Image (tube, rainbow, N blue to C red):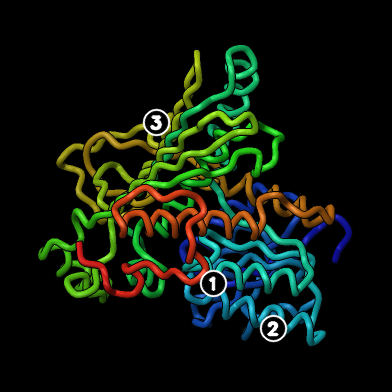
Amino acid sequence: MTPGRLGIGFIGSGFITRFHLRSWEAVRDADVRGVWSPNRAHAESAAALARSLHVGAAKAYDSITDMIADPAIDALWICGPNHRRVENMEEIVHALKSGAGELVGLACEKPLARNVGEAKRVLALVEEAGVLHGYLEDQLFSPGLVRGREIVWARGAALTGRPYLARAAEEHSGPHMPWFWRADLQGGGVLNDMMCHSVEVARFLLTKPGAPRHSIRPTKVSAQIASLKWSRPEYAEALRRTMGVDYARRPAEDFARATIFYEDEDGRTLVAETTTSWSFVGAGLRLSSELLGPEYSMSVNSLDSGARVFFSRAVRGRAGEDLVEKQNAEQGLMPVVGNEAAEYGYEGENRHFVRCFLEGRQPELDFRAGVEVMELLMTAYMSAEQERTLAWKPDGLDTFVPAVARGAWKP
């Protein structure tokens, strides 16, 4: 390892990797040096993007093992599909234990896996590898969320008491790639795909800055899921045409909500309300959160941007996402998110994990946190299936696979 710098390799070359690459312009002490994907052309394209952004002399590799064997690679960012998590981790551990190369750390995108059993396997593998590990939850590093939380706790909570209610939501019109729509590959529908963000955001807001994650503990979970839009015949046909998935036969939820009750160190009740949707039609991706306490409140909405543009009916161009992720229109009054990589938290998260790895410091937001998030998500699926509130922690989580993922769920 070059003193004071990390060489980063990416596993995966798709949408999320490209968000990370754009964020790397704000990371000063690491360089992107490699990309591996089972599709060589996609890996070459992502590496070329990294070079064009001047974030590192990235190249494509033939395998994960080859990337680890290169002394230029010090840490890996795991950004491949959910159904490849265990497989990718097994190759990483085998390469390290066989002496093919060395790594300082591993960072893994959300969710850690498709279910609790797989998540615990991923955790066991990283512990076997003996390297530092971080769970990539970008929204915890969103500048507005971070600063708002700091102010609320320093002023409102310090004078009138801790916050007691957090709300977090993520909504858009649907994923980019076919595997996200495949519940067997992704692990479920929108609950598994996006509530992993919202659950962790709400917990983050309710936890006192500087206090450990376990300072608040779950006590019960209640959840509901539904397919509101994409299992309708006309939209199921659109999915079959554009994504090659059959929602008429194997639907997944496009709406989910969960209420999680926590208890703080003094036994006081705290509540997290989370909502996620693939059936939202608006300007584009909407991330929103609220935090409420005895004499104060805070709110954040990613679509409350500082810039807006207006296009009349006469402006007709091709569909794109040049204004905001998951953009749904090209006409009318539209918000412009000037730097999505910063606004959504990618810049802050990558600076954080790079610094932890350089300093040899284990991040608190690690694979164990990823397992805890997965346990909450699977409890939410259990609650939705049983149509009742479940006390924490329910039996059977380690072997539970949601009916949605098994193809046994009917909306």
Q: Between disc 3 and disc 1, whose residue precedes? A: 1
Farthest residue to the left: give it: 233
Relative vertical location of residue 237 with respect to residue 197 in this rendering, above or below: below
Question: Residue 227: horizontal and vertical position, in percent?
Answer: 22, 57
How packed mark 1 is, by other alpha carbons closer than 10 Å (few <14, some 14-19, many 20 or more), is many
Front-most of 219 and 282? 219
| Residue shown at 26% from the left, 47% from the top | 280
Q: Could you tell me how far apart the alpha carbons at marks 3 and 1 are, in whole angstroms?
A: 37 Å
Query: Label 1: which residue?
Result: 118
Query: Label 3: which residue?
Result: 304
Question: Residue 98: horizontal and vertical position, in percent?
Answer: 79, 87
Q: Quadrant of residue 170?
A: top left
Q: Is residue 303 left or right of residue 350?
A: left
Q: Could you tell me how far apart the alpha carbons at marks 3 and 2 are, in whole angstroms?
A: 44 Å
Front-most of 47 and 75? 75
Callout 1: SS = helix
Relative vertical location of residue 182 with respect to residue 61 in this rendering, above or below: above
Query: Label 2: which residue?
Result: 65
Q: Which amino acid, mark 2?
A: Thr
Q: Is residue 193 left or right of residue 219?
A: left
Choose mark 3 or mark 1, whichever is in front. 1
How packed mark 3 is, by other alpha carbons closer than 10 Å (few <14, some 14-19, many 20 or more), is some
Q: Quadrant of residue 371?
A: bottom right
Of the 4 image quadrants, the one containing the N terminus is bottom right
Q: Which amino acid, mark 3?
A: Asp
The label on residue 130 is: none
Q: Is residue 321 visible?
A: yes
Question: Residue 76: horizontal and vertical position, in percent?
Answer: 68, 68
Q: Is residue 57 visible?
A: no
Q: Between disc 2 and disc 1, whose residue precedes? A: 2
